[in-house]
Amino acid sequence: MARYHNMTAEQIYDDLDLFRDFCRDYGYRFNEADLYNNKKYPYQQYRKFEAGKRAKNMWEIDANRPPRRHRNH
């Protein structure tokens, strides 16, 4: 977190908007607390995306999964 110490509020909100857009476009659950937290999977994928690498698109992955079967009790 030390490298983000000198960021302005505007920069943080801009990053938050970009992270939110990524989560919406790639099918990840958005949580503001995940921003700058490298232990969280959505933020890890966002960092890959920002670096120009291929991030997993959860919309595509979920579309290929068979539907869940619910048990009736």
Image (cartoon, grey):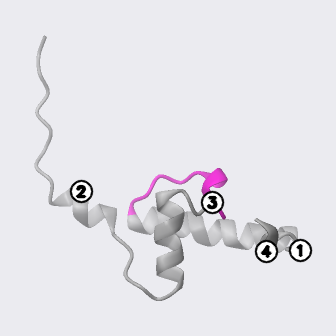
Q: CA distance from mark 2 to mark 4?
A: 35 Å
User: Which is more foreground, mark 1 or mark 2?
Assistant: 1
Residue 5 drawn at (x, y percent): 86, 69
Q: Which residue is mark 4?
A: 3
Assign the magenta stretch its main secondary structure.
Answer: loop
- Tell whether 66 sits left or right of 39: left
Q: Which mark is residue 6?
A: 1
Mark 1 and mark 3 in contact? Answer it, CB < 8 Å.
Answer: no
Residue 37 drawn at (x, y percent): 63, 60
Work out which residue is located at the far bottom of the displayed protein and give it.
52
Q: CA distance from mark 3 to mark 4?
A: 12 Å
Kind of residue indicated by mark 4? Arg
Q: Earlier in the sequence, mark 1 or mark 3?
A: 1
Kind of residue indicated by mark 2? Asp
Q: Residue at point 66% right, 64% down?
A: 36
State which quarter of the image contains the N terminus: bottom right
Which class describes the residues within 10 Å of circle 3: few (<14), some (14-19), or many (20+)? Answer: few
Q: Earlier in the sequence, mark 1 or mark 2?
A: 1
Q: Which mark is residue 70?
A: none
Q: Residue at point 24% right, 56% down?
A: 62
Q: Which residue is mark 3?
A: 37
In terms of depth relative to the viewer, which is nearer, 39 or 55?
Answer: 39
Q: Which residue is mark 2?
A: 62
Q: Which residues are magenta?
A: 27-36
Q: CA distance from mark 3 to mark 2?
A: 24 Å
